[in-house]
Amino acid sequence: MEEISKTPLTELGEFGLIDRLMKDVKIKEKSTIKGTGDDAAVINNGIFHTLVTTDLLAEGVHFDITYTPLKHLGYKAVVVNLSDVAAMNAMPKQITVSIAVSSRYTVEALEELYKGIKLACDNYGVDFVGGDTTTSRSGLIISVTAIGQAMAEDIVYRNGAKENDLICVSGTLGAAYAGLLVLEREKKAFKESQGAQPDLESYDYILERQLKPEPRLDVIKALAHLKVKPSAMMDVSDGLASEIMHITRNSQTGAEIFEDKLPIDHQTGDVAKEMKLDPTTLAMNGGEDYELLFTVSQEDYEKIKDNPAFAIIGYIKEKNAGVNLIARDGSSNPIQAQGWDALNKK
Ligand SMILES: [Mg+2]
């Protein structure tokens, strides 16, 4: 009898699994410009190209309903997709939303979820154009697809970074993960104390970053206004370390990132201290920041240097230089992507 091998999912990790499942998928259609392997797929529609991206959130894996308000969850489910469209230097136009839901949820609970979805659509001028609803045996699963648009020549991929380009990131890093650590800690304390209400006031910024992130479409607009087209870009969903590895691998380059340039909010620093963690680890590996990581030519330095919306954190190097974090003491440490991995996360 033929041996059937049974490889556990955890052996491959998320990206390994995608590679394996997609390996014999061939692009047949001339209008398909980019399939898997970037933040969104790109379809040629003449002058304008269409961007398509989809993301699925599963209860108990991506969110914990005990501390995630449903309205926030709906909002975030949309935002993570709009962020992927922004990462292609494009504007989102429409979404579809599909849910699978168990009988544990009431109609009113789902109305709350959809309030958040509609709010995100209103805030970002996106139309909610369809979807599907079905039952689930356990918990809630939400899948959102976003459709975006850009002029063909404006689209930015992960593979365009060149040696000496500046590496930039918008906003701050590590805050969403710091928020998650606080929520998990307070959940545990709540259980142990049988109902004491947690004091979360001093954590407002990081909790908002975890529960209600925003897509950086303002950064896309700011770059267009400055007449700066990044050479490569992606959004920070799995952590800076993982994302810089994607950009350098796709662009066939190395990189140098400076620890003292990482934008870290003081609340993130406070939580790191309380929990005896290194704030740099939170910034590099925390994930779910939904900021934009992009590279620009040195010629654009004057245009971007004083913009408070983003920080210059390093340089693209030639491939053999590797991908390194230059610590505060000047030592150079290879960056390893230990970020969030959907299939390995408990
Ligand atoms: Mg992405």
Image (tube, rainbow, N blue to C red):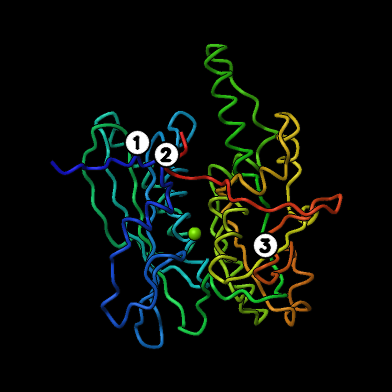
**Which residue is drawn at the image coordinates 65% and 39% (left, top)?**
204
Decide which of tag 1 and tag 3 comes sooner along the chain.
Answer: 1
Q: Which residue is mark 2?
A: 70
Numbered label tally: 3
Looking at the image, residue 246 sits to the left or right of residue 310; the answer is left
Give the Cα distance between marks 1 and 3: 49 Å
Residues at badges 2 and 1 in contact (C-beta under 8 Å)? Answer: yes
* Up/down of 241 relative to 312, above or below: above
x then y, percent, for residue 168: 69, 65
Q: In percent of the image, x 32 and y 61: which residue is there?
A: 22
- On the image, the x and y values in percent for residue 134 come to 21, 44
Residue with the mark numbered 3: 322
Q: Is residue 131 left or right of residue 298?
A: left
**Image quadrant of residue 290?**
bottom right
Q: Earlier in the sequence, mark 2 or mark 1?
A: 2
Give the class, few, some or many, for how many residues have Cα within 10 Å of label 1's Cα (few <14, many ≥20).
Answer: some
For label 1, the residue is 109
